[in-house]
């Protein structure tokens, strides 16, 4: 008996269906893919070689010129950093140099507050001395001037404006206290509705269920920082004087990662083309592992950046005095002394007033930091102190603790 064609066709369809099931079992639902913690879905960043650049949305490696051609149409280029990593700052400078060959460029920096802008304007024009600029950096950011010096020098030599991005201390103090913004100003609009940003930040803060409420205040402060920096970027973009100028934003990678820190918040205010580049570390040398911040892993369904540039982790091996300084009306005082530090070994104690270092008068914390930056391991320094109304000399040996 001949089997009808319709039955044969049905049999083929059923056979194909079961073959499909064997290849792709349904289990009641389709399979879901989570973007890995690195934000690189196509390639493990650990497999990259030092110096390789990965385009995260495609998983393709590109060379420097290809990346630069790709970002040339962006109005804002965000470059992250691990603050103390020398190699990250080399990447930043290389990109700034290349961009400045083709376009007018300004450099926006997390390291300076908006309140410093008047003096920042005097740096690239040559009106501010190197010493005054160093003091400005120390006042705004603290230590680490040596890390950024090549960028500062290039900006001055080539007259690239610097833009302070961060909120002023008086604004932060008022915000932290719950007071209105000072001097008839307004706080920037805060968007706290991004679930991925919140989850990412809470993980970085060490948060988990039951502690979100306790971490709400630091989260709000982080929002103030990022929204203020984003607001500064947007103001730069709408200023007619800057219509042909590209803005390179340098900040901690945390504020750029996944785009929901500064980039998305700036775009919300002024839609524009932007690119994000992350100098990426996947291995921390054993001697530097105490610097690693261990955080809860969170899978975010976003690319970590447009480009990941694999770099080594190298830091300046600076000498340490081992104290916390405080600026008082009478001068620089010792607020605290770290146990087993060079300062404790030398006999410096909390409450000491620093008068001079190696014969140079000390009147500000910036001057102390500047003096320390000129020291190497095993160097000796003589400090003149005042303690309980009496002056005394103390010799400090800068051992490597």
Image (spheres, rainbow, N blue to C red):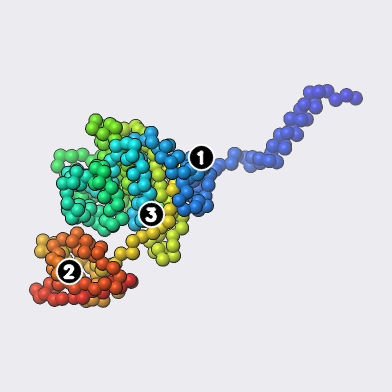
- Give whichever of discs 1 and 2 has the lower sequence position: 1
Image side of residue 393 versus residue 315, left or right: left
Give the camera-side residue of 13 and 227. 227
* Mark 2, residue position: 357
Disc 1 + disc 2, Cβ < 8 Å: no
Q: CA distance from mark 2 to mark 3?
A: 32 Å
The x, y position of residue 179, in whole percent, is: 19, 46
The x, y position of residue 130, in whole percent, is: 19, 53
The reply to whether residue 391 is visible in this rendering is yes
Q: Quadrant of residue 241?
A: top left
Q: Is residue 196 above or below residue 210?
A: above
- Give whichever of discs 2 and 3 has the lower sequence position: 3
Give me the residue at 48% from left, 40% from top.
57
Regarding mark 3 in the picture, which secondary structure is present there?
helix
Image side of residue 363 versus residue 323, left or right: left
Closer to viewer: mark 1 or mark 2: 2
* Quadrant that contains the N terminus: top right
* Mark 1, residue position: 58
- Give whichever of discs 3 and 1 has the lower sequence position: 1
Q: Quadrant of residue 13?
A: top right
Give me the residue at 50% from left, 44% from top.
61
């Amino acid at each position: 008996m001949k089997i009808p064609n319709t039955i044969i066709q049905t049999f083929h369809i059923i056979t194909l269906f079961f073959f499909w099931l064997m290849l792709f079992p349904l289990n009641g639902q389709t399979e879901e893919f989570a973007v890995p913690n690195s934000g690189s879905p196509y390639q493990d960043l650990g497999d990259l070689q030092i110096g390789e650049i990965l385009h995260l949305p495609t998983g393709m490696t590109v060379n420097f010129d290809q990346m630069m051609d790709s970002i040339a149409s962006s109005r804002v280029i965000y470059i992250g950093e691990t603050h103390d990593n020398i190699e990250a700052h080399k990447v930043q400078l290389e990109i700034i140099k290349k961009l400045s060959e083709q376009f007018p460029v300004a450099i926006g920096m997390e390291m300076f507050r908006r309140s410093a802008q008047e003096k920042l304007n005097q740096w690239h024009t040559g009106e501010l001395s190197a010493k005054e600029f160093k003091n400005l950096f120390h006042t705004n950011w603290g230590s680490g001037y040596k890390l950024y010096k090549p960028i500062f020098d290039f900006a001055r030599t080539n007259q690239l404006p610097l833009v302070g991005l961060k909120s002023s201390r008086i604004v932060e103090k008022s915000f932290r206290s719950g007071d209105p913004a000072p001097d008839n100003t307004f706080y920037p609009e805060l968007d706290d509705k991004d679930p991925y940003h919140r989850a990412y930040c809470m993980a970085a803060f060490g948060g988990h269920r039951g502690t979100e409420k306790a971490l709400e205040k630091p989260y709000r402060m982080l929002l103030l920082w990022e929204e203020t920096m984003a607001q500064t970027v947007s103001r730069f973009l709408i200023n007619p004087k800057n219509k042909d100028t590209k803005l390179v934003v340098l900040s901690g990678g945390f504020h750029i990662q996944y785009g929901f820190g500064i980039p998305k918040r700036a775009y919300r205010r002024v839609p524009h083309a932007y690119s994000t580049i992350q100098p990426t570390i996947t291995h921390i040398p054993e001697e530097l592992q105490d610097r690693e911040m261990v955080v809860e892993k969170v899978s975010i369904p976003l690319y970590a950046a447009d480009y990941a540039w694999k770099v080594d982790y190298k830091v300046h091996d600076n000498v340490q005095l081992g104290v916390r300084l405080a600026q008082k009306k009478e001068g620089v005082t010792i607020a605290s002394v770290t146990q087993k530090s060079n300062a404790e070994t030398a006999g410096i104690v909390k409450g000491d007033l620093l008068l001079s270092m190696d014969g140079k008068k000390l009147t500000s914390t910036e001057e102390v930091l500047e003096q320390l930056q000129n020291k190497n391991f095993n160097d000796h320094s003589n400090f003149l102190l005042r303690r309980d109304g009496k002056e005394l000399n103390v010799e400090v040996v800068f051992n490597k603790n």
